[in-house]
Amino acid sequence: MVLRFQLDATFTFSKEIAKIQKEVQTIFDTTLSSIKAKQGPDTIQLQNLKATKNQFSFSIISEGSFRPHTALLQMKNTIGKELGKTHHIGVREITINQYRIEFDVEKPPLQEVTIPFAKVICKDTHVILTVQQADDEFLQKNYLDRMISRVKEKIENQYYEGKGEFWKSIWESPEKKPVWKKDPTEEMIQKGWLQQGPTKGKWMYRAQAAAVLKTMERIALEEVLIPLGFQEVIASHIVPFDIWLKTGHMEGMPGEFYYVAEPKTRDTKEWEHFVDLTKITKEIPVEELAKNVAVPRAGICYAQCPVLYWSLKGKTIAEESLPVLIYDNTAISGRYESGGRHGIERVDEFHRIEPVYIGTREQLLDLREKMLERYKHVFNNIFDLEWRMAWVTPWYMQQAGKVGAESQQETGTIDFEAYMPYRGDRKQSEWLEFQNLSILGDKYIKAFNIKAQKSDLWSGCSGIGLQRWTVAFLAQKGLDPADWPQGFRKYLEKIPEGITFL
Amino acid sequence: MVLRFQLDATFTFSKEIAKIQKEVQTIFDTTLSSIKAKQGPDTIQLQNLKATKNQFSFSIISEGSFRPHTALLQMKNTIGKELGKTHHIGVREITINQYRIEFDVEKPPLQEVTIPFAKVICKDTHVILTVQQADDEFLQKNYLDRMISRVKEKIENQYYEGKGEFWKSIWESPEKKPVWKKDPTEEMIQKGWLQQGPTKGKWMYRAQAAAVLKTMERIALEEVLIPLGFQEVIASHIVPFDIWLKTGHMEGMPGEFYYVAEPKTRDTKEWEHFVDLTKITKEIPVEELAKNVAVPRAGICYAQCPVLYWSLKGKTIAEESLPVLIYDNTAISGRYESGGRHGIERVDEFHRIEPVYIGTREQLLDLREKMLERYKHVFNNIFDLEWRMAWVTPWYMQQAGKVGAESQQETGTIDFEAYMPYRGDRKQSEWLEFQNLSILGDKYIKAFNIKAQKSDLWSGCSGIGLQRWTVAFLAQKGLDPADWPQGFRKYLEKIPEGITFL
């Protein structure tokens, strides 16, 4: 892709420049020469120079990796340094008259593409960006390159959107005859094991349902994580935006977070009017509340791994501690599911154990085999499930345009899917993703600058959702412990009685 | 306290009333007579009647429990019903010219008192409220009585504020020689067991600290809750305001909540501009975020009991299920602590097990003895702590003006406090509240309309804070398992190794 830039700018000086026009011209020439020396002779040109009173207008044209605004800022600084002392003159203001960027993309856009700060015109695979807002921050923080990437990404996504996710089966259990074909959530509600929670997509697990979830937790710990040497840590479940900026979640799914806002103050005097109104009207005075609550700067945990990586940010890990094997079993996950909610399998609040592993490529590929073996043991021998495994492409790879090359057998995600008899025929119906296992290469390692004494590090994680395990098991095995496989009954022989209501 | 009301109002009619003045007068007289018949002859008077064109002005004066605006609304309705058909006339508008309430309080206010909707003038113990805003909602929802209560409460609180909390020691362990006198949080940070969390007042418990917290959890379950027959339930940790309105938390501590806000939509189109800006600027566009996030309507769990009570709202419990013994060990508590944070003992995010018990008075008094016995066993035999118990008055009793009558030995709260050697001399320094146990009578039972088949119900709860147990233990016993009492070492013999950093 050839990148071509044209920047039309005007320097407004602090005084008239008639006397120093030559010196300015020399500074421009010198700057350009030094850039050409580094970047190559054809990379940059200066055109349309025009001086009037206290202004100097010009165009910078460049190609390739050099950005004209870098030259612009260099020239401004040099003028300040060289002419400031001798002539007491400097650039008071930079005006960007026009900033145009042209480049080619692989395929033409299917729909119009828009981005902030610039107008986008596409002629087949040729893209022209005309910047419409360019202040100091825009130039200094180099928004431009990320704008170009964003346009490319949006065009690629237009092609991607139509297609399904990459999915390739790698293992299937034999068919198993399900005990029943009912929706376990509905049946648990009927039996009083489970109750809709106080807000959307959340549940109250009474003693009976809680006993099943807690059994899943014990099995995950005792049959998978503890035998493999994982150690428990306890992470905060309130995640500030700066962590999600590093992991890409903030860009990836801002519409799926539960946002967390602090009070502006704890001072009871400041809250007195709110309390007065609440006590008198017995309703929440929404406007008064808005005055006293700050803008959100954090959200409830979406998955535990970002905070686990954050906890190792900038650290250098001793070789003897590799692979690092940790898990969090405390932080509660919140995801705003909107219309997609169903039962306890697609919920806004759920409970996951998340193991995170960090080590060399070899250590992690070896660990993956061991984890797969432990998971197979649980799902085959303890749950006796009908299930399968498939390679899938997670969102962040899709987002980055890395859509499902079949060769991704080292890094990538394996989904574990269980047949849900209540959804219909095993061939036709959608199976439930009830477990996954990822090796992510150095993506998060780099994002959080985690190092080892000597080795190059990779990392991965494998979310164990207790609700998903519960539904996968109950949907095939029913609610009567008499029907459950022996392996599971060793862990939970009977359901607690719970409370009788009239 | 004698309550005296004077309401000066004007009815504006839809037409001139010269012709029907008599009929209106009759309706007024009839309404008043029927009120006097029910409430007593001296309760209400009508004065200063004046008719002009299409208006009718008058004063209603009443004493005691009857409210003049009730008569006002009755008269308006009767006019509509009786004169609407015959004369096609009705009250188009009610204007409140003045609404004055006078009453006496026990003690004169120490400072000025203000409330919404009215001006407050106090002359010694005599209070005059002059209503300044009275729309339909004000009259229909009867704000007035809650305004009177609020004024009384504010005056009572002025006397209360100066005084300390009610506190009466009821049991003390013998003195124990502490192993060390260091602040366990500081030492755990030094040793790498513990790390400041990503936001204020939250912590990352690495494997070493997590092992201690999880041991506390096991001891609480195995030595206290399971032997007493408590059953685990799993509650949502996102609490909508309507639950906190019922428990009084919303009025009690709105400045201490972590508020939860949902996205306005999950639609990626609506979030596209936010994502564009985030990807290009690598910062959160706060204004764009504010557009897409809704007003908070919930908060993160403050204590688990409100949601546990809510889960039984409106239910009738079979006698055989009494006492109901449940606990939540999943919901994470968040409290905005502001300036008061210290170590892991006063934090914004903590992990508690909360048992809730519901039963007859006798059942709960009996249970309290058993729970005290189990807690004593843990703190004496397993932790070998120096600690004490005291009756205290919780905030909601203070708020209600029920300040510490010493006879409250049936309902009320017992605080468990541990000596913190790092804070100095055992007689001079503040001990740490590390456990409590409450019996609350029928306060929450009534708030959530929970009933039993036959019996009258009481309830109570007893928060077990894992961080508090941990600090109480470590502050006296140190970080070296070799120094720990045998009873505790049976549960945790050694600290996991954790990760070595260079």
Image (cartoon, coloured by chain):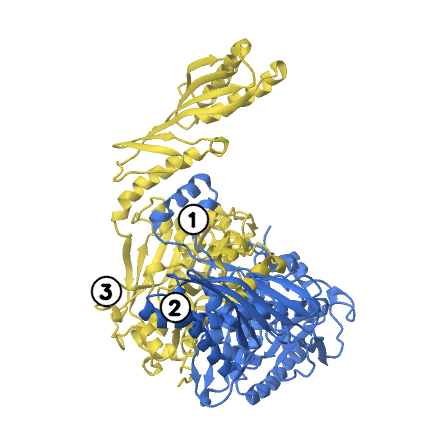
Chain colours: A blue, B yellow
| Vertical side of A43 occupied by A495: above or below | above
The relative height of residue B408 versus residue B212 in the rendered view (above or below) is above
The residues tagged by marks 2 and 3 sit, at their Cα atoms, a distance apart of 75 Å
Q: Chain of mark 2?
A: A
> Is residue A251 shown left or right of residue B177?
right
Q: Position of residue A147 (x, y in %)?
A: 57, 67
Q: Position of residue B148 (x, y in %)?
A: 38, 35
Q: What's the amino acid at mark 1?
A: Lys
Closer-to-camera residue (A320/B283): B283
> Which residue in the protein does label 1 denote?
A291
Depth order, front residue of B241/B384: B241
According to the picture, the residue beneath numbered tag 3 turns out to be B429
User: Which residue corresponds to mark 2?
Assistant: A20
Q: Amino acid at mark 2?
A: Ile
| Discs 2/3, front | 2
- Seen at 44% across and 23% down, the residue is B39
In whole angstroms, how far apart are the C-alphas of marks 1 and 2? 56 Å
Asked if marks 3 and 1 fall on the same chain, the answer is no
